[in-house]
């Protein structure tokens, strides 16, 4: 009898683990919605409609389980029932192109303008720090997209129009500036400290030495998928990379490529999603593990 109960317990445990499928929060310039996708099936399980004219190039999930995103005119934190927790609206002709999470649970906003502005908010949306930086780029839209805080708490700004990355302290001091051969959309700080830079319409991503800016690696070819506009790149827990392959600048002849591509450490494509009808354009993503279906969305 004891063996019977053990078998039942094992079956239930396996079933529960199988039910907790990995999900992806995705968004992108030109995509009218922020979506939650089931990674295994590609099914859209939740959508949050953006308002007309909004442009979302960054999305994240907080530890509390709320959704953070930028929408060009500002940034919002919303619940799964679409209730707005806070709404930070940018002044004048500026653009909020980046809203990313800080290690302390707060939020870092990257606001394109003259000068550019970087604002830290606490978990309640209250401003706790701000830094200005003159990038000498007249059009705010050409300045940058995703800005992240590094492990040393400095900000890394990938400046598209000037083909460089700039590291700035929380006090606004520039401590490093690296000219690169590409227009970086985002960045990823690798475990050893070097930087992975997705280079948009260059159709590649590269790794540079954090100290010298020297190019260490460039990936412009994948066996099984073509790189279009290389937007955000995430590093997953299994050390694979998840690439947002935005197709907004690609003509019809070359658009039949996946919007999301997962590659292993050898550069082999192990998973991809090609569903323009349901997922739309994807330039930003957040990997969500252990979500148990619709119950998660109604908390």
Image: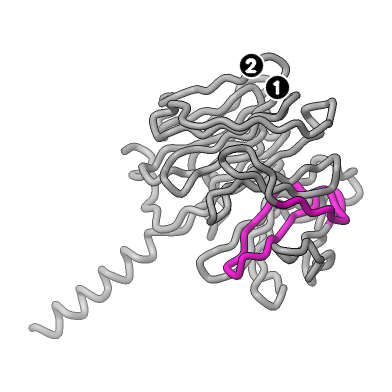
Q: Residue at x 67, y 39 (%)?
A: 28
Up-down relation of residue 246 to residue 263 (above or below): above
- Tell me if 6 is positioned left or right of 65 in this view: left
Q: Residue at x 25, y 76 (%)?
A: 10
Up-down relation of residue 230 to residue 207 (above or below): above
Quadrant position of the C terminus in the picture: top left
Q: Position of residue 268 (x, y in %)?
A: 71, 74
Q: Main secondary structure of the magenta part?
A: loop
Q: Position of residue 32 (x, y in %)?
A: 65, 30
Q: Nearer the viewer, residue 167 or 141?
A: 167
> What residue does disc 2 label?
91
- Disc 1 secondary structure class: loop
Q: Nearer the viewer, residue 133 or 203?
A: 133
Write the start and end of the magenta stretch as one range: 176-203
- Disc 2 secondary structure class: loop
Residue 191 magenta-highlighted: yes
Q: Residue at x 57, y 37 (%)?
A: 99
Disc 2 + disc 1, Cβ < 8 Å: yes
């Amino acid at each position: 009898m004891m063996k019977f109960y053990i078998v039942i317990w094992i079956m239930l445990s396996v079933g529960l683990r199988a039910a907790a499928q990995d999900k992806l929060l995705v968004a992108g310039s030109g995509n009218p919605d922020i979506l939650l996708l089931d990674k295994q099936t590609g099914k859209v399980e939740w959508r949050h409609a953006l308002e007309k004219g909004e442009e979302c190039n960054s999305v994240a999930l907080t530890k509390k389980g709320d959704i953070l995103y930028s929408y060009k005119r500002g940034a919002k934190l919303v619940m799964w029932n679409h209730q707005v927790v806070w709404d930070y609206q940018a002044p004048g002709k500026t653009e909020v192109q980046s809203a990313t999470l800080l290690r302390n649970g707060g939020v870092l906003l990257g606001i394109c303008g003259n000068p550019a502005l970087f604002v830290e908010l606490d978990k309640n949306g209250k401003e706790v720090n701000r830094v200005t930086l003159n990038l000498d780029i007249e059009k705010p839209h050409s300045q940058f997209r995703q800005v992240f805080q590094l492990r040393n708490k400095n900000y890394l700004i990938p400046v598209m129009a000037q083909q460089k990355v700039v590291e700035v302290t929380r006090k606004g001091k520039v401590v490093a500036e690296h000219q690169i051969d590409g227009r970086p959309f985002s960045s990823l700080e690798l475990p050893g400290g070097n930087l992975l830079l997705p280079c948009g319409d260059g159709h590649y991503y590269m790794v540079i030495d954090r100290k010298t800016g020297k190019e260490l690696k460039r990936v412009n070819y994948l066996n099984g998928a073509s790189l279009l506009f290389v937007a955000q790149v995430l590093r997953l827990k299994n050390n694979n990379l998840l690439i947002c392959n935005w197709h907004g600048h690609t003509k019809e002849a070359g658009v039949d490529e996946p919007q999301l591509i997962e590659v292993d450490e050898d550069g082999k494509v192990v998973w991809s999603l090609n569903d323009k009808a349901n997922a739309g354009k994807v330039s930003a993503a957040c990997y969500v593990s252990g979500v148990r279906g619709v119950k998660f969305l109604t908390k």
